[in-house]
Image: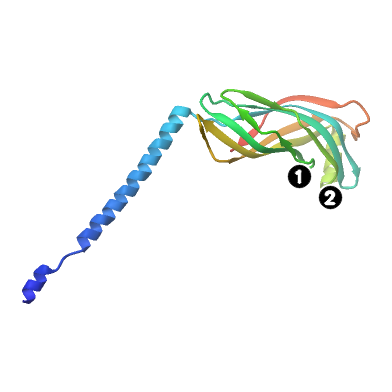
Amino acid sequence: MAEKEKKCEIDYSKYVDAATRRIVYGCIGLVVTVAVVVFLVWAILHPHKMDFVLQDVTIYEFNISQPNLLTSNLQVTVSSHNPNDKIGILYDRLDIYASYRNQQVTLAHLLPETYQGHLEVTVWSPVLTGTAVSVEPYLTPALNEDINAGMVLLNIKIDGCVKFKVGAWVSGCYRLLVNCPASIPFSGQFAGTGPAIKDQLAQQCAVDV
């Protein structure tokens, strides 16, 4: 009787092992399939980051009106080029502002939502202002020193959302960070009483998506 019961026993471990192998192979197959699809999309579309250029900066006012208070009024011209011939770009909620030594010195200006087609160029010319903006105490002597030396390095920055469009498909939002250095030559406290200072730069910007 015991021998008969022993023969009826079923070894379930081999079924568990077989099911585990199927799950592992299925997961590997899914990962490989996704990787192949991503590679094919990349190979076909050849996606490239957009190119940003700071074309010029016009300074109307830029001075320390009171200790640690900076007043500025400037207009910048920034262009963006879409280098992709199969991918459109949607610029959404882009804020542009000026900073000095990593501190924002103007209010953020919201650029209009813009769709950029294949190989197209878009140009923006916003006015950036900041009235009596409080700056860190250590920036005042540094800024006065730069102004007296005749050269101030500003950074025009863009922070926002960018989407990519292929046919009818639109991607999710990717954060876009653009940094455009601008070396502005002038001397003395520029208080807006004289002619504006316009500097043609054609400065390539750093782009991070």
Name the amino acid, label 2.
Pro
Quadrant holding the C terminus: top right
Marks 2 and 1 in Cβ contact (< 8 Å): no
Does residue 69 lie above or below 121 as drawn?
below
Compute the Cα span from label 2 to label 1.
12 Å
| Amino acid under disc 1 | Gln
Q: Is residue 54 left or right of residue 65?
A: left
Residue 163: give x, y in percent of width and height: 57, 36
* Quarter of the rendering occupied by the N terminus: bottom left
Question: Foreground residue, 124 or 157?
Answer: 124
The type of colouring in the image is rainbow
Q: Where is residue 21 in the image (x, y as percent from the top left)?
A: 27, 53
Q: Is mark 1 on a helix, strand or loop?
A: strand
* 20 shown above or below 108: below
Instruction: Specify the label residue 103 is tagged with.
Output: 1
- Residue 105 point in image, percent of width and height: 79, 42
Q: Mark 2 points at which residue?
A: 137
Residue extending furthest toward the bottom: 1
Assess disc 1: are there few (<14), some (14-19) or many (≥20) residues with their C-alpha within 10 Å of its C-alpha.
few
**Residue shown at the point (87%, 47%) measured from the top left:** 68
> Badge 2: few (under 14), some or many (20 or more) residues near its Cα, within 10 Å?
few
